[in-house]
Amino acid sequence: MANDPSADTSASKNLLKVFLVDDEIVIREGIRNRFPWEETGFTLCGEAPDGEIALSMIQDLRPDILVTDIRMPFMDGMALSRAAAAAMPWMRIVILSGYDDFAYAREAITLGVKEYLLKPVSVQQLRETLERLAGVIAAERSQRADLDALRRQLASSQRLVQERLVSRVFDGTFTGAMMAEARAALLPLNAACYAAMVLEPERRERLLELRAAAQRVADVSGGAVALAESGGQLLALVLGDSAADAEDRAYSYAQAVAHGSERVSARPPLIAIGSIVSSLADVPRSAGSARAVLKGMSADGSAPARILGASDVDSLGLVSRDLMKSEVTPLYDALRFASARDVPRVVERYFASFGGMASQSLLVAHYALVDILLASARVVKASGGEPSKVLPASLVDALSYKNALGAARPVQSEGGIPQMGSAPSEIIETARDLLTSALAYRDERAGSTQDAVIRKARAYIEANYHKPEITLNEVARHAGLSANHFCTVFSQNMGTTFLEYLTSLRMDKAKAFLRESDLRSADIAERIGYTDARYFRYLFKRYAGMPPREYREGVRNGAGK
């Protein structure tokens, strides 16, 4: 199993992400430890010993630059580069090769690889190469899409014919007699299954930019995606060898387009994926479901999802918009994926956000309790329940629940602030009971499809984080989704990638071991899933801001957390 990527700190978010693949641990260590990452504008977001493991991680992390060896077991550097270039055409690739492989490495030119280095690679050589690529990436990000080139492309007769035929497929007027015309225009339309997609830019004037990004990804799809334009939206027809293949390709395409669009736009487009159909004649039905999903996404401006499929529509919680617009969205977001054992931590953090006032003032403590009530009500409503029938009736009545739903703050009851407890500590306990009731109801009802998937995935990760071989693909299979579908659902709902989440969990476990035991760093690394103790220490320093030894000393001196 590859080592997990380092946690993404706020300081590293603007750095270019580099992913390293080499089966020789000495090579990886040398590059990892000797290269001046942050000071040169880069961050090592992850590493792997072979291409097969790396590909799964790259799909999740989406680095800007891939540095890979040629000769590796299972999947070599050329196969990895081919797969990565198809899925993430924006990514720059650097090939590492021995002297005997140099001629072989030249084949990478056909994949658009323009950088390859002979081993052993010096820090200076790698720095010059990465800085050269950084200049190329910066130039791309500073420019808008090449609208003139796009117009020339759209003006070509073949492209116009393709777009016209795809539009006919979407509106249901495509006939069997048109199949020969499609073949002549190099538009393959024969497939076992299809998925219709509707893409909408953040602003209408950004449609051409979105089209440019979408077309670049479609061009390297091997004919699996065809595009058209209609009414300020982009239409994409995805072809698959099976229902699962069509769905996986659709999510993979959506992720690639969203990532490409972010490079020229502050906010990615909305992308809706319709139901999977097995006949070209049924594509209009798939398109209809995609438009329905897009309408729901557009109506809910607060929804975190920018990519959503018809099978995921439950997770939008397209009910009780009055609650969705309340002032407690951050608190509600913290609860969406919390378990009952997380309740004390959530309550503690929320009351702590008021500073010392919540522990000293009954007024402030009750103010916080009202927020807890509203957030709990949203959890119940999103699970299909009626809060007044699920939450403790006495608490709902005392806090004037009905008034709370119609106003930013509930109207005080006749006797003033409800005296739920004689001290803020008792109010905090009441808040815990309230949240526990809401989460218990959610778990009994199994909530929405995506919430259930996330909870299932989180439980599996919690039970298996200590295993070095745990991968995104493994967790996706356990959750019942394809890798690309799971990657999209997890990152949009959790606000972080699978690997970043796994790394964060492992680092928290490492902190606990450092606080509560005398285990050596190497032993802790092994217990939380790392086979390379030095890489663990590297990650821990990135995550905690200090080496494990210093963290332990700080805790014992009363300075650590």
Image (tube, grey):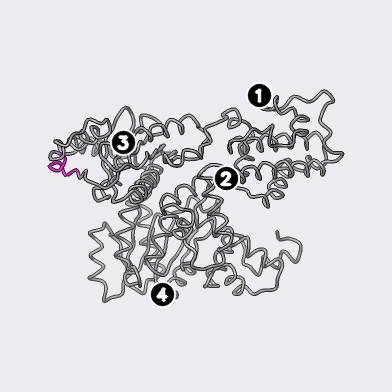
Above or below, comparing residue 404 to residue 218 in the picture: above
Q: Position of residue 14 (x, y in %)?
A: 48, 50
Q: Position of residue 16 (x, y in %)?
A: 44, 54
Q: For mark 2, give the secondary structure.
A: loop
Question: Which three-letter amino acid code belongs to the residue tagged 4?
Answer: Glu
Based on the picture, tell me whether residue 330 belongs to the magenta stretch: no
Q: Earlier in the sequence, mark 4 or mark 3?
A: 4
Residue carrying label 2: 446
Q: Earlier in the sequence, mark 4 or mark 2?
A: 4
Single out the mark in the foreground, 4 or 2.
2
Are there few (<14), some (14-19), or many (20+) residues within 10 Å of tag 3? many
Q: For mark 1, give the secondary structure.
A: helix
Residue carrying label 1: 406
Single out the mark in the foreground, 4 or 3.
3
Q: Position of residue 59 (x, y in %)?
A: 41, 55
**In the image, which disc is placed on residue 235?**
3
Magenta segment boundaries in residue numbering: 182-187
- How much space separates mark 1 and mark 4, taking CA atoms? 63 Å
- How much space separates mark 2 and mark 1, taking CA atoms? 28 Å
